[in-house]
C-alpha cells in the first residue's frame, strides 16, 4: 500500500468516525424529539425553545400545515404556537403552575 492509498484510507476513516461520533447521535436525538412532539397530549408539561415552561391545553392537527398547540403558562397566560417550538416534554410537576395546582408551595429565600 503506497502513501496515497494510505492517506485515502485515513481520510475515509476520519469521515466514518465523524459520522459515528457526531452526526448519528444528533440524528437519533432529532428523531426522538420529533416523536415526542408528535405524541404531545393535553396535560403534558413542556419546555419551549424560548425557555418557557407550560402545560399543553389543546393540540390542533390540521389537514395541511404544521401542528398547532395551545400552551397555558399559568396566571391566565395562554399562548397559541407551533408544535415545532417545543424543545422537550418535562416531567410532571416541573412547572410553577402545575405545582400550584397540586398544592406544592414555592419557597422564596
Image (tube, grey):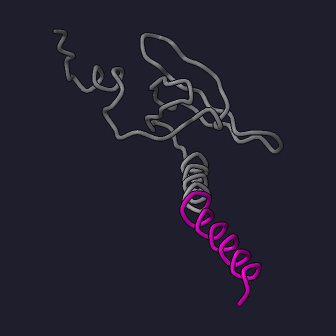
Instruction: Give, as a single range, the part of the protein colored magenta.
Output: 1-23
Location of the C terminus (image quadrant): top left
Point out residue 85 in the picture as x, y percentages from the top left corner.
Answer: 62, 32
For the stretch drawn in magenta, the main secondary structure is: helix
- Observer-nearest residue: 7 or 29? 7
Q: Quadrant of the N terminus?
A: bottom right
| Magenta highlight on residue 26 | no
Query: Which residue is drawn at the image coordinates 73% and 86% (left, top)?
Result: 2
Q: Residue furthest right?
A: 64
Toward the front, the furthest residue is 3
Q: Please state which of residues 84 and 66 is positioned toward the viewer in this rendering.
A: 84
Decide: is 61 above or below 78. below
Residue 90 x %, y %: 40, 39
Residue 61 is left or right of residue 95, and the answer is: right
100 over 47 or under it: above or below: above
Front-most of residues 51 and 39: 51
**Near-viewer residue (75 or 46):** 46
Left or right: 2 with respect to 17?
Answer: right
Q: Answer left or right for 50 relative to 12.
A: left
Judge whether residue 6 is colored magenta: yes
**Residue placed at 57% from the left, 57% from the top?**
22
Residue located 75% across and 82% down the image: 5
**Residue 73's x, y, as percent?**
47, 19
- Note whether 80 is above or below 45 in the view shown: above
Q: Quadrant of residue 78?
A: top right
**Residue 98 x %, y %:** 34, 26
Q: Residue at x 47, y 11 (%)?
A: 76
Establish if 30 lies above or below 60. below
Total number of numbered discs in the rendering: 0
Amino acid at each position: 500500500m503506497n502513501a496515497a492509498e494510505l492517506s485515502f484510507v485515513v481520510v475515509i476513516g476520519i469521515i466514518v468516525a465523524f459520522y459515528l461520533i457526531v452526526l448519528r447521535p444528533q440524528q437519533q436525538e432529532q428523531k426522538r424529539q420529533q416523536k415526542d412532539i408528535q405524541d404531545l397530549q393535553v396535560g403534558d408539561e413542556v419546555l419551549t425553545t424560548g425557555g418557557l415552561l407550560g402545560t399543553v391545553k389543546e393540540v390542533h392537527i390540521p389537514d395541511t400545515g404544521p401542528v398547532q398547540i395551545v400552551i397555558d403558562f399559568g396566571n391566565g397566560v395562554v399562548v397559541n404556537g407551533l408544535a415545532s417550538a417545543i424543545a422537550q416534554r418535562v416531567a410532571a410537576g416541573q412547572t410553577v403552575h402545575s405545582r400550584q395546582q397540586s398544592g406544592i408551595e414555592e419557597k422564596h429565600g
